[in-house]
Image (cartoon, helix red, strand yellow):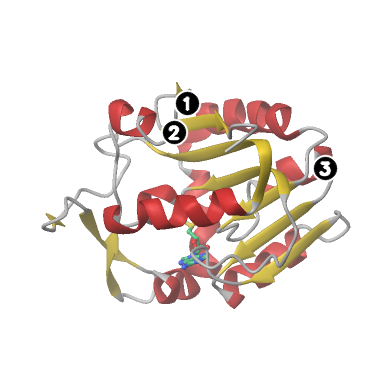
Amino acid sequence: MKDYYAARAAEYDQVYLKPERQADLRAVEQWLPTVFAGKTVLEVACGTGYWTQFIAPVSAGLVGVDASAETLQIARSRLSGLAVTLVAGDAYELPIGERRFQSAFAGFWWSHVPKSQQRRFLDGLHAALQPGATVVLLDNRYVEGSNIPLSESDAEGNTYQRRTLADGSVHRVLKNFPSRRELLAIAPGATVREWPYYWALTYQLPFSP
Ligand SMILES: C[S@@+](CC[C@H](N)C(=O)[O-])C[C@H]1O[C@@H](n2cnc3c(N)ncnc32)[C@H](O)[C@@H]1O
């Protein structure tokens, strides 16, 4: 995953140019900032900072974490002038020290978390947040003709795509497309928003554990 996205960094933002997704992108770009306005935000797997550019200006401070130096370099230039701290690190071992955030966002990350690692990821994420914090996971719905077809699955139910980069290299990438029911099971009281090409799961942490 990390190596694939490092190799893909320069061409990553092309995914945001797909013509059929433009209306959905505009809708999500308008909605997301309303969730994070006035809150401190921990953004996991921030990549090239595409979503960061909409969230950071309304937030009360944003820390973005990503494993790839290559994507972070693009994010740094895109976000220059915004009050954003970008940190290289692992989503499963978040490098945030003692800081606790009022909200968290992960765009197009959940689909890459192996099923066996989902609880570990969530426990680490929740430990980085304040009681009552808001969490948003945003990701793809599978749409024939727009998404790369799934090529295989493994014993724990993860699905995979074969993706080709501009240099011709082919990568086997774990990409899950959870059902609405699976999403709602992630956290009590969670709500799912759906657009034709995307879903967003939103929930609040309890105030007392
Ligand atoms: C599909 S991209 C999403 C990027 C961005 N959130 C967006 O929506 O445009 C997934 C990102 O996860 C990062 N990544 C892969 N493995 C990671 C890990 N273990 N910890 C943190 N980031 C990781 C990749 O470098 C890549 O930027």
Q: Which residue in the protein does label 2 denote?
A: 187
Q: Residue at x 67, y 51 (%)?
A: 42
Identity, as a three-letter code, of the amino acid under mark 2: Ala
Q: Element under label 2?
A: loop
Does mark 2 have its CB less than 8 Å from ligand 1? no
**Sequence-earlier tag: 3 or 2:** 3
Q: Are marks 1 and 2 in contact (CB under 8 Å)?
A: yes
Q: Report the side of 49 relative to 106 (left or right).
A: right
Position of residue 162 measured from the top left corner of the image (x, y, whole percent): 23, 62
Q: Residue at x 48, y 31 (%)?
A: 201
- Measured in 3D between alpha carbons, the distance from the residue under mark 3 to the one under mark 2, in whole angstroms, is 28 Å
Identity, as a three-letter code, of the amino acid under mark 1: Ala
Position of residue 97 measured from the top left corner of the image (x, y, whole percent): 71, 67
Identity, as a three-letter code, of the amino acid under mark 3: Pro
In which quarter of the view is residue 144 placed? Answer: top left
Q: Quadrant of the N terminus?
A: bottom left
